[in-house]
Image (cartoon, helix red, strand yellow):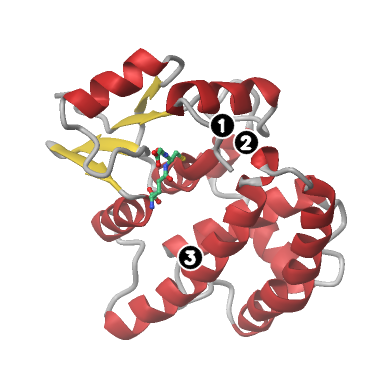
C-alpha cells in the first residue's frame, strides 16, 4: 500500500475538498485516483471498498476509510488538529458541523434546478446565521478554539474562499473573519496549495457535473 494517503473521488472539489484542505494544512502529501467512468466505480463496489457504496474513499494507514466526517476526524486526530480534550473537541465539532452545512449548500449548487434562488438563500444564511458566529469567536481569539490551529479553522478558511467565489465582498462586514482568512493564507502549505499548478481543484463546471452523473449512473439531485 502507498505510503501516502490515496484519495479516490471525482476530479473536482465536492465532499473530498475539506479532506484535501485538512491534509494540506497537516502537510501530508497524497495521491489521487479520479473517477471518470462507471466501470471504475462498479469495480470499487464489487471489491467491497465502499462500505455504503459511496465516495469519498481514503486509503490511509492500511485502512480504507469512507464517510467524509469520519475521515476528517481521523485526520484531525492524527495530526493534532482536534483539540486537547473533549470540551475543546465538542466546540470544534459544533463549529465544524455548521461550516459543513454551509459548504454543502454551495457544493450542491451545480446539481440543482434553480441555483439562483438557492444562491440568495445561501448568501442570507451566510451573513445572518453563520458568519456572525465566527466573527464573534474571532474577536476574542486568533483561532476558533483553544488558542491554536484546529480543523475548525481549516474548514472556516475553506468556507470563506467558497463564499467569496460566489459573493465577492461578502466578508466586508466581517473584519475578524477577513483578518483570520489573511492569517491562514500566511501558512506556507496553504500558500503552496493556493498557487496555480497545485492539487487544488477549480470550481465545479459542466464537465464535473456530467462526470459525477456518469460515474454514479444517475442525476445527483
Ligand atoms: N455521508 C456520506 C455521503 C457520501 C456521498 O453522498 N457520496 C456521493 C458522491 S459525493 C456518492 O458516492 N453517491 C453515490 C450514492 O449515494 O449512491 C459522506 O459524507 O461521505
Q: Quadrant of the N terminus?
A: top left
Which structural element holds mark 1?
loop
Q: Is residue 18 visible?
A: yes
Provide residue 42's location: percent of width, then percent of height: 30, 21
The CA span between labels 2 and 1 is 7 Å
Q: Are marks 3 and 1 in contact (CB under 8 Å)?
A: no
Foreground: disc 2 or disc 1: 1
Query: Dividing the picture into quarters, in which one does residue 31 lie?
Result: top left
Which residue matches tag 3? Answer: 152
Find disc 1 in the rendering and name its residue: 200
Q: Work out whether residue 12 or residue 172 is closer to the camera in this orientation and state it.
A: 12
35 left or right of 76 in image: right
Determine which residue is flagged by label 2.
194
Badge 2 or badge 1: first in the primary sequence: 2
The C terminus - image quarter: top right
| Mark 2–mark 1 CB contact (< 8 Å) | yes
Amino acid at each position: 500500500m502507498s505510503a501516502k494517503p490515496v484519495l479516490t473521488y471525482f476530479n473536482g472539489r465536492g465532499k473530498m475538498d475539506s479532506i484535501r484542505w485538512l491534509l494540506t494544512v497537516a502537510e501530508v502529501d497524497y495521491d489521487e485516483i479520479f473517477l471518470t467512468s462507471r466501470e471504475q466505480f462498479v469495480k470499487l463496489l464489487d471489491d467491497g471498498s465502499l462500505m455504503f457504496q459511496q465516495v469519498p474513499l481514503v486509503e490511509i494507514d492500511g485502512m480504507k476509510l469512507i464517510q467524509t466526517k469520519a475521515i476528517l476526524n481521523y485526520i484531525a486526530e492524527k495530526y493534532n488538529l482536534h483539540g486537547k480534550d473533549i470540551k475543546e473537541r465538542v466546540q470544534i465539532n459544533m463549529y465544524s458541523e455548521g461550516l459543513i452545512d454551509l459548504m454543502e449548500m454551495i457544493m450542491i449548487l451545480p446539481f440543482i434546478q434553480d441555483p439562483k434562488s438557492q444562491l440568495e438563500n445561501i448568501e442570507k444564511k451566510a451573513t445572518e446565521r453563520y458568519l456572525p458566529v465566527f466573527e464573534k469567536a474571532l474577536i476574542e481569539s486568533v483561532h476558533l478554539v483553544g488558542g491554536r490551529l484546529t480543523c475548525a479553522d481549516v474548514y472556516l478558511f475553506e468556507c470563506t474562499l467558497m463564499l467569496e467565489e460566489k459573493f465577492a465582498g461578502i466578508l466586508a462586514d466581517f473584519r475578524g473573519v477577513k483578518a483570520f482568512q489573511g492569517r491562514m493564507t500566511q501558512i506556507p502549505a496553504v500558500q503552496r496549495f493556493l498557487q496555480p499548478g497545485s492539487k487544488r481543484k477549480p470550481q465545479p463546471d459542466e464537465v464535473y457535473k456530467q462526470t459525477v452523473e456518469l460515474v454514479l449512473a444517475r442525476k445527483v439531485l
